[in-house]
Amino acid sequence: MSLLLPLLLAAADPQLAMNPLPVGSVVPFGAPPSAAVQVFEAELGPVETFDPKGRAIDLARDLPRVWSGVYRSFAGGEPLPVQLRLAEATPMGQMVDLRGEMQLGETTVAVQGNLNAKSDQLDLLMLCDCEVGGMESGGEISGVQGLELAGWVAPRLTNPGGRFDLRPVAQTAAPSAPNPSGGAPVRGLW
């Protein structure tokens, strides 16, 4: 370290390099000139280049509308089949407003919530005054990676909640039109 100190001091202040400081002394701090800071900001632009409003628009357009999976209560019991159908996904600033319905076993309930485009945090409420699969009224579905990693947070400490394992359902594409020329379709070389 003693060999490195003169080199560090020379880089910080050439005057300090010529007059080494005794051990335990304080090295004065000199802020960079304001012109250097302005040049740095002008050349590189703002620090945060992420556009959460733009991502919210993309999410509202591209978010799969049908999700399927299971709900498992932390209290035990059989997994409950779940299907979530999102009827609307509307961008509102950096949030995406979600509305639709969720089928839990044989029961279908309306759901409404928000997906944060910046953090992928999800808050989804069941809009019923009912208990479905151990999920009682007043709880919420909360996710930290959108719908893929979500759980049910109970309104009381005596209910441990549960976990959703949801995956997007592939939408079936419309059958392609037959080739009118009757020949094989054209393929690229690569």
Image: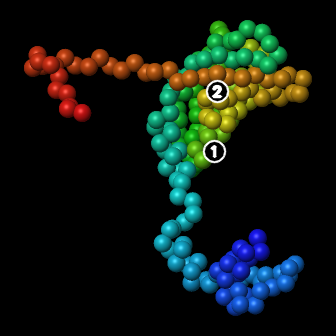
The answer to whether residue 167 is seen in the rendering is yes
Q: Residues under labels 2 and 1: Cα distance?
A: 21 Å
Residue 108: % across, % down? 63, 15
Q: Counting residues from the N terminus, which is met first, the one under dot 2 or under dot 1?
A: 2
From the image, tell me which residue sits under label 1.
119
In the rendering, which numbered label is found on residue 43? none
Q: Quadrant of residue 152?
A: top right
Please, is residue 15 above or below residue 52 in the view?
below
Q: Which image quadrant: the C terminus?
A: top left
Tell me whether the residue at label 2 lies in contact with that at label 1, contact meaning CB atoms closer than 8 angstroms: no
From the image, tell me which residue sits under label 2.
111
The count of marks equals: 2
Q: Residue at x 46, y 21 (%)?
A: 170
Residue 28: % across, % down? 77, 84
Which amino acid lies under the numbered mark 1 shown in the image of this protein? Ser
Please, is residue 1 above or below residue 162 in the view?
below
Q: Which image quadrant: the N terminus?
A: bottom right
Residue 67: % across, % down? 55, 22
